[in-house]
Each structure stands twice: as structure tokens, then as C-alpha cells.
Image (spheres, rainbow, N blue to C red):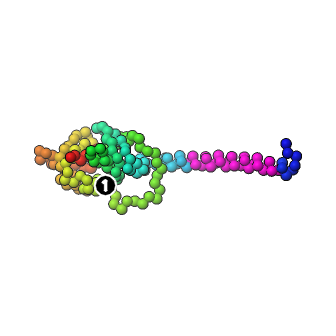
Amino acid sequence: MASDPCEVMGLVIAQEWSLISSLRDEELLSDAQSIAEAEQRRTRVLDRLEAACGQQIHVRLAGGCVSGTLRELGAGVLLLEGEHDLIAVGSLGIISLRELPPALRREGTPASPLPITWPSILRRHFDSVPVRMQLADGCQLRGLVESVGADHLDVRELDGTRHTVMFTGISMLIRTR
């Protein structure tokens, strides 16, 4: 035990500083955990999907599963690039997503100048090409996309039958070769 008053005071100060530092570290850790929990509660699937752009994702729909690299994400639609196909998936038909990476919200990220929508994706990637379509009710259509409207598309089957399909009714649209 130290007998020098300055040495004793130094030990007391060191001990108190250690205690204060320990309490401060616990306080900082508690604050960080609270912030992380609050952020987790605010995180939406859309935020996690944004973080997954460029990565492989697995989507479960009523009619089965589809996998691919997430290329674009927009209002009600995901665009996946599969091994051999380009696939548009309606977000209303998604039951679950497997292996979706955890992510924090992207605060302050500038909005894309052109919002990605069903019409923009369909006009760029599916207009006038043969498609296979799975509808929300389980029916399947095969045909050629003839036109794309603001909330629908027209598909002509091989036998000439023409269908007008609402975007909300599309579970999955696959560009066929």
C-alpha cells in the first residue's frame, strides 16, 4: 500500500477514472444498442432489397420460387436476372424472401431521376418479346407483349387470343427466348 499522499491520490484518481470510463463504456454500448434497435424497427423490406441490388436473391411466390440477381427495384416490381432469363416479379405476389441481407435504412440517398415502375421495366425489357406470365390466381399465359399501358399490358397468345392484364395481377413475368 502506498504511503505517499501524492501516490495514494494518484491511485484513487486512477481507480475513479477507471470506474467512470467503465460506466461511460457501458452507457455508450447501451446507447448504440438502443439506436440499432430503433433503426431495425424502422427498416422496411424495401430498404433491405435496395441493399441487395446486385446480389442473388430467392423469392417465394404462390406458384413456386424464383432466384436471380436483383438488377432493378421499383414501385411494385423487382427485376431479376436469372441464369437464362430476365424475370419481373410483382411485389404484391411475394410471400417471402430467402437470404435477404440485413441492412440499415439508406438515409439521404437521392431518389433515382426516373422511378422504376412496371411500365418502365416492361417497355425497356419486355416490349414486343415472347413472355411466360404467372398471374396472381395461378393461371399462366404465354405470348407476345404487344403494348404496355400505364397500369396494364396487352399479351397476344400464339393462337391469337389477346389478353389485357393489370400489373397488380402479375406474380411473375419471364422473358423467353
Q: How many marks?
A: 1
Q: Residue at x 37, y 45 (%)?
A: 56
| Residue 49, percent from left and from top | 40, 48
Q: Which residues are magenta?
A: 9-34
Relative to residue 131, is residue 115 drawn left or right? right
Q: Residue at x 13, y 45 (%)?
A: 158
Amino acid type at image mark 1 = Thr
Label 1 element class? loop
Q: Residue furthest left?
A: 159
**Residue, disc 1:** 117
Q: Nearer the viewer, residue 7 or 87?
A: 7
Residue 104 colored in magenta in the image: no
Q: Residues within 10 Å of mark 1 (few under 14, many from 20)?
A: some
| Residue 110, percent from left and from top | 42, 60
Quarter placement of the N terminus: top right
State the predominant SS element of the stretch in magenta: helix
| Residue 64, percent from left and from top | 30, 37
Q: Residue at x 33, y 56 (%)?
A: 116
Relative to residue 155, is residue 12 drawn left or right? right
Q: Residue at x 25, y 42 (%)?
A: 134
Is residue 91 among the parts visible in the rendering?
no
Residue 20 colored in magenta in the image: yes
| Residue 60, percent from left and from top | 34, 39
Is residue 26 among the parts visible in the rendering?
yes
